[in-house]
Amino acid sequence: MDILVVAPNLPTDPLERQRFLVGLSWGRLEPKGLLPEEFDRLEAKGALGFLREGLEV
């Protein structure tokens, strides 16, 4: 299962961010992380079609 984390305090370096999120995950969880500005940029381009359903917490 994939989980998308959008948070301002994630590491800015994508590889460091992935290592950080994987270190917090368990089981078959596959975390993906974006900074809010990255999410906004992708949303403006219409590039978030991979999000089928979600829960904002």
Image (spheres, rainbow, N blue to C red):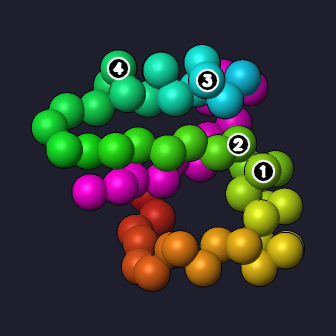
Mark 3 or 2, closer to the camera? 3
Residue in view at x 41 percent, y 72 percent: 54
Left or right: residue 7 compared with residue 50: right
Q: Where does the image place residue 17, in percent across and percent down from the top left?
A: 58, 26
What residue type is disc 2 on?
Leu
Question: Would you call the spot at circle 1 few (<14 residues within 10 Å), some (14-19), or many (20 or more)?
Answer: few
The quarter of the rendered structure image containing the C terminus is bottom left
Badge 1 is on which residue?
38
Badge 4 is on which residue?
23
Task: Give the mark count.
Answer: 4
Q: CA distance from mark 1 to mark 4?
A: 22 Å
Mark 2 or 4, closer to the camera? 4
Q: CA distance from mark 4 to mark 3?
A: 12 Å
Dots 2, 1 in contact, CB < 8 A: yes
What residue type is disc 1 on?
Glu
Q: Which residues are magenta?
A: 1-12
What residue type is disc 4 on?
Gly
The quarter of the rendered structure image containing the N terminus is bottom left
The relative height of residue 10 versus residue 53 in the rendered view (above or below) is above
Q: Where does the image place residue 40, in percent across and percent down from the top left?
A: 79, 62
Residue in view at x 45 percent, y 81 percent: 52
First of labels 4, 3 by sequence position: 3
Badge 2 is on which residue?
35
First of labels 1, 4 by sequence position: 4
Residue in view at x 19 percent, y 44 percent: 28
The relative height of residue 3 versus residue 49 in the rendered view (above or below) is above
Badge 3 is on which residue?
15
Left or right: residue 44 compared with residue 31: right
**In terms of secondary structure, where does tag 2 sit?**
loop
